[in-house]
Image (spheres, rainbow, N blue to C red):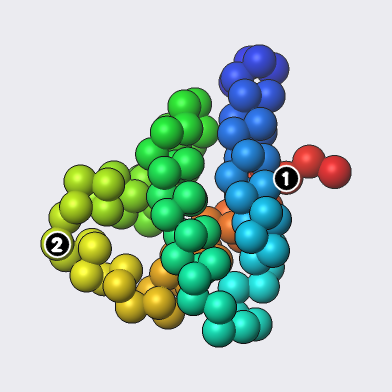
Amino acid sequence: MNVKMKKIKNEEAEKILNIYRFFQKDGKLYLNEDTESLDMLYDAVINAINNCGALKAQLPYQEFVHPCKQVLMNDAGWVGHFQERDNRRFFLSDIHDYLKLLYETK
C-alpha cells in the first residue's frame, strides 16, 4: 500500500472516530442510557461508513460495510435488527474498537 493511500485511510478512520468523540461515546457506549445521542451516533456512523472512500475497502465487509449499506437501503431485516438498541451498541462498539486498534494515530 502506498503512503498516500495509507494516509487517506487513516484520515477517514479518524473522521469516524471523531464522530464518537463528538457524541462523547469514545469507549462509553454502555455507560449510560442516553438513547437520543446513541441514535444520532448510529445514524452518523452508518452514513460515514457508507460515504467513506478507500477505508471502506479495508473494513470487514460482512461485519460493517454490508449492514451499513443495507440500513441505507432500508432493508427491513437490518433495520429491524438495529431497532434493538443493544444491537446498535454492539455494532458501534465493534466499529469503534476496530478503528482504534488498526488506524488511530497518536
Quadrant of the rendered image containing residue 8: top right
Helix, strand or loop for disc 2? helix
Q: Residue at x 67, y 47 (%)?
A: 18
Q: Horizontal and vertical percent for residue 44?
A: 48, 50
Type of amino acid under label 1 = Glu
Asked if labels 1 and 2 touch by Cβ distance under 8 angstroms, the answer is no
Q: Which residue is mark 1?
A: 104
Q: Horizontal and vertical percent for residue 65?
A: 36, 46
Seen in the image, is 52 located left or right of residue 83?
right
Q: Horizontal and vertical percent for residue 68?
A: 34, 50
Q: Horizontal and vertical percent for residue 16?
A: 59, 45
Q: CA distance from mark 2 to mark 1?
A: 33 Å
Q: Quadrant of the N terminus?
A: top right
Q: Earlier in the sequence, mark 2 or mark 1?
A: 2
Depth check: give the residue in front, 84 or 66.
84
Number of marks in the rendered image? 2
Q: Which mark is residue 76?
A: 2
Name of the residue lying farthest toward the front: 36
Q: Which mark is residue 53?
A: none
Type of amino acid under label 2 = Ala
Q: Is residue 101 visible?
A: no
Q: Nearer the viewer, mark 2 or mark 1?
A: 2
Q: Residue at x 41, y 50 (%)?
A: 46
* 6 in relation to 30, above or below: above
Crowding at dot 1, Cα within 10 Å, few <14 / some 14-19 / many 20+, comes out as some
